[in-house]
Image (cartoon, helix red, strand yellow):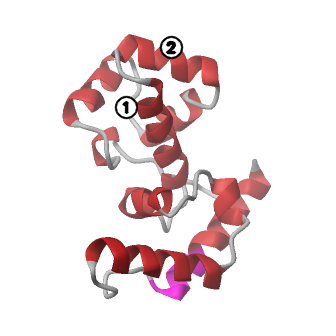
Amino acid sequence: MATSAYPLNQLPGLSPAHAQSMIRLGLTSTDQLRRYGSSVVRRQALAKKMQVPLRYVTKWVILADLAQVPGVGCQFSGLLLHAGIMSVAQLADCTAQGLYTQLRRLHVATLQRNDLCPSTDQVNLWIQQARAIAKAS
């Protein structure tokens, strides 16, 4: 299954200045960041080079990991992270109804509205795509 890669400036929570800093270091896409950040040592090195806390780099790598799921992309990776989903493997282990309920609660609690919440069909697609990526890994 082909995964999705996005320009770093589309990653939620990554400021334009931080995106430019990564680009200067040779990281230009979410896929490159995900691959580079797969080890703690590399994440620590990147944090040091960028002069940011390690937790920032860790968050960006998690978002990039989730963004590789085609249906999630950069549009929903932040939502999944806020719901406690920290990896494609964790997403693959979810049930559609359980995750949908969690996302709906999060939407209502933070946005006071439910109409922007992804549908159960979307959530189910994400899980199926995550399972295919996890299986291929």
> Which corner quadrant holds the N terminus?
bottom right
Q: What residue is disc 1 on?
A: 28
Q: Is residue 108 magenta?
A: no
Front-lying residue, 83 or 11: 83
> Are the residues at dot 1 and dot 2 in contact (C-beta closer than 8 Å)?
no
Question: Which residues, given as a range, are shown in magenta?
Answer: 119-125
Point out the frontmost of discs 1 and 2: 2
Which quadrant holds residue 134? Answer: bottom right
Mark 1 or mark 2: which comes first in sequence?
1
Residue 114 position (above or below residue 31)? below
In the image, what residue type sits under mark 2? Ala
Reading the image, the residue beneath label 2 is 45
Residue 33 coordinates in the image, percent (x, y): 48, 33
Q: Which amino acid type is shown beneath numbered disc 1?
A: Thr
Question: Residue at the spot x=54%, y=81% of the render?
Answer: 100
Up/down of 89 relative to 50, above or below:
below
Asked if the magenta segment contains residue 122, the reply would be yes
Q: Position of residue 66 (x, y in %)?
A: 53, 53
